[in-house]
Amino acid sequence: MARDYYEILGVDRSTDKEEIKRAYRRLARKYHPDVNKEAGADERFKEINRAYEVLSEPETRARYDRFGEAGVSSGGASPDMGDMGGFADIFESFFSGFSNTGQQQQARRRSGPTRGEDLRFDLKLDFREAVFGGEKQIKISHLETCGTCSGSGAKPGTRPRTCGTCSGTGQVRRATRTPFGSFTQVSTCPTCNGTGQTIEDKCESCNGLGLNQVTKKLKITIPAGVDSGTRLRVSSEGDAGQRGGPSGDLYVYLFVQADNEFEREGINILSEIRISYLQAILGDKIAINTVDGKKPLTIPVGTQPDTVLTLEGSGVPKLGNPVARGDHLIKIKVDIPTKLASEEREVLEKLKEKQFGGASKGGIGDILGGIFGNQK
């Protein structure tokens, strides 16, 4: 399964467009083949470009958030090279050094609202459910904000207090002197575990966590045309955030079970049918099984074994555009009998005499083999 594009760029799913651009530029400077000569840097650079190509455009990003790679694999927007600023921008700050801005932002995140974790749910679908979509009910277990303490973790009537060790920053700093100068080491506050707060009287319902594990049922809509590996995003159904932060999302990964009669190739459906040698010689009109039910199929006169006939528009709906459908491709297998009724044999013997003359002594298999050739 393809790597997550957000993971490739090292950003959260709630990250805005500007932060995604900054993350892209930072990684592009690091892995550009002109700068990084390590093995695999070129492939990593291509991977980074692909992730930015999808996530930098609101439309393709929305499709990716909902369907995953399947929603953008048929083509997407190209990155806006003008907006990226070219290589002058990329190398402008390559040797400009580092600052503690990231550490400051991390400290604010620890003591402030925190977004909840995203969750994954694997869902199996029958073949026809994947073709036509529909509603499915699933059961998930996730963290919800405690109703007793409203997420504070403190017993009703009390409040959390600012941590005295870190003064609410969630971090402690330790300065160390060396012969080369002094440096500061920053670590998570051991008293409040980075929250910036301490709770003296814990809420009994959630034991001071502010969150409770809850099992709930959800109805999710399966779009027509999904396939194994398609990912659906259910907004805000992941774990609840802490200290007023937003909930994470639920990602439903779909796995389509094999069907005894049909196979799938892209948006086309494949199947096989067996017909008699007389139907193959004389032609016929029969009813066959499709995902839409029974449909008529015309067998042309003189149909050869392994001929593929097509029912247009009877395949899989295109994901995101269910009006457009693939085709149903039917491979023809011809049954050649080993035993015949006397009247049928008499007719075939006359056909044999006419086609081969009196020299041929072969059986019925040789006669029909001469008509159809060898079947696989």
Image (spheres, rainbow, N blue to C red):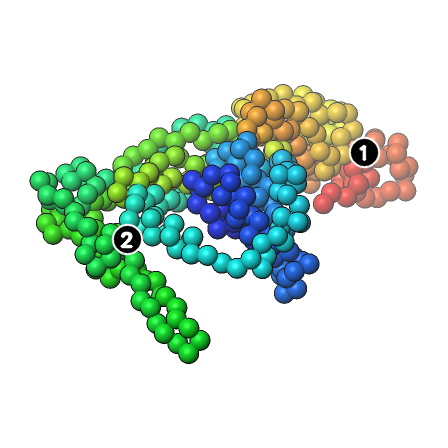
Per the model, the C-alpha gap separating discs 2 and 1 is 98 Å
Quarter of the rendering containing residue 121: top left
178 to 348, vertically: above or below: below
Q: Residue at x 21, y 41 (%)?
A: 151
Q: Secondary structure at mark 2?
A: loop
How crowded pointer 1 is (Cα within 10 Å; few <14, some 14-19, many 20+) is rated as some
Observer-nearest of 362 and 154: 154
Q: Residue at x 31, y 50 (%)?
A: 110
Residue 269: x %, y % from top left: 61, 33
Q: Of discs 2 and 1, which sits in the foreground?
A: 2
Amino acid at dot 1: Glu
Q: Which mark is residue 169?
A: 2
Q: Which mark is residue 53?
A: none
Residue 347: x %, y % from top left: 78, 29
Observer able to see residue 169: yes
Observer-nearest of 166 and 373: 166
Say left or right for 27 vs 103: right
Instruction: Point out the tag, 2 or 1, that comes first from the N-terminus.
Output: 2
Name, please, the residue furthest toward the bottom: 179
327 to 96, vertically: above or below: above
Q: Residue at x 26, y 60 (%)?
A: 189
Observer able to see residue 44: no
Say left or right for 255 vs 80: left
Q: Residue at x 66, y 40 (%)?
A: 81
Q: Which residue is mark 1?
A: 349
How crowded pointer 2 is (Cα within 10 Å; few <14, some 14-19, many 20+) is rated as many
Residue 54: x %, y % from top left: 57, 40
Quarter of the rendering containing residue 135: top left
Q: Secondary structure at mark 1?
A: helix
Say left or right for 202 vs 133: left
Residue 318: x %, y % from top left: 58, 29
Question: CB atoms at circles 2 and 1 under 8 Å apart?
Answer: no
